[in-house]
Image (tube, rainbow, N blue to C red):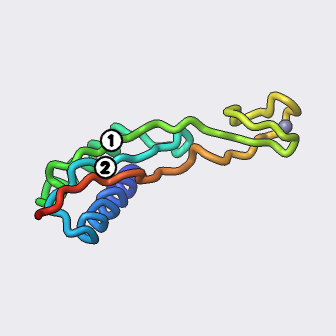
């Protein structure tokens, strides 16, 4: 399942960040989800919650997904949000942003 591997990747990324920083707890993970990534954020959050259950380090972590609008450009010079047809020349624009799933921030708690 597509969403499951994404949820697991996010879990693994947060876990690694936590271990690298000797965290006692992961509080929040912020993720940018491109609207063209073909992913259902609610399902990713649901699966993430299932995966983190057994991990004391991430048990209370909240996954926060932000929608990212697609950005495209065309060889004619057009740059905007049209993903199918360039409004200037009618060609198929190139997607420069909006397909990616990126962890933007991992909030952790560190013991003193
Ligand atoms: Zn064009």
Decide if ligand 1 comes within 8 Å of the CB at mark 1. no
Splitting the image into four quadrants, where does ligand 1 fall?
Answer: top right
- Percent across and percent down for residue 42 are 34, 37
Q: Secondary structure at mark 2?
A: strand
Query: Of residues 31 and 38, which is closer to you in this image?
Result: 31
Mark before the other along the chain sequence, 1 or 2: 2
Question: Quarter of the image containing the C terminus?
Answer: bottom left
Given contact means CB atoms under 8 Å apart, are the residues at marks 1 and 2 in contact? yes
For label 1, count other residues whose C-alpha is less than 10 Å away and answer few (under 14), some (14-19) or many (20+): some
- Percent across and percent down for residue 51 are 22, 55
User: Up-down: is 9 above or below 28?
Assistant: below
Decide if ligand 1 comes within 8 Å of the CB at mark 2. no
- What label does residue 64 carry, if any? 1
For label 2, count other residues whose C-alpha is less than 10 Å away and answer few (under 14), some (14-19) or many (20+): many
Q: Is residue 99 left or right of residue 74?
A: left
Q: Furthest residue to the top?
A: 87
Q: Secondary structure at mark 1?
A: strand
Marks counted in the figure total: 2
User: Up-down: is 75 above or below 82?
Assistant: below
Residue at 75% across / 37% down in the picture? 79
Among the 4 quarters of the image, the one containing residue 72: top right
Query: Of residues 90 and 68, which is closer to you in this image?
Result: 68
Q: Is residue 105 left or right of residue 97?
A: left
Among the 4 quarters of the image, the one containing residue 40: top left
Among the 4 quarters of the image, the one containing residue 9: bottom left
Q: Is residue 55 visible?
A: no
Q: CA distance from mark 1 to mark 2?
A: 6 Å
Q: Is residue 44 visible?
A: yes
Residue at 65% across / 39% down in the picture? 71
- Percent across and percent down for residue 63 are 29, 45
Q: Residue under label 2, please give it.
A: 29
- Percent across and percent down for residue 14 are 30, 60
């Amino acid at each position: 399942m597509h969403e499951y591997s994404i949820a697991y990747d996010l879990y693994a990324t947060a876990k690694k960040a936590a271990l690298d920083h000797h965290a006692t707890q992961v509080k929040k993970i912020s993720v940018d989800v491109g609207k063209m990534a073909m992913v259902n954020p609610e399902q990713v959050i649901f699966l993430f919650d299932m995966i983190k259950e057994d991990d004391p380090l991430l048990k209370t972590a909240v996954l926060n997904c932000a929608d990212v609008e697609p950005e495209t450009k065309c060889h004619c010079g057009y740059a905007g949000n049209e993903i199918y047809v360039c409004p200037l020349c009618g060609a198929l624009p190139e997607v420069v942003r909006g397909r990616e799933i990126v962890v933007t921030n991992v909030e952790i708690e560190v013991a003193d």
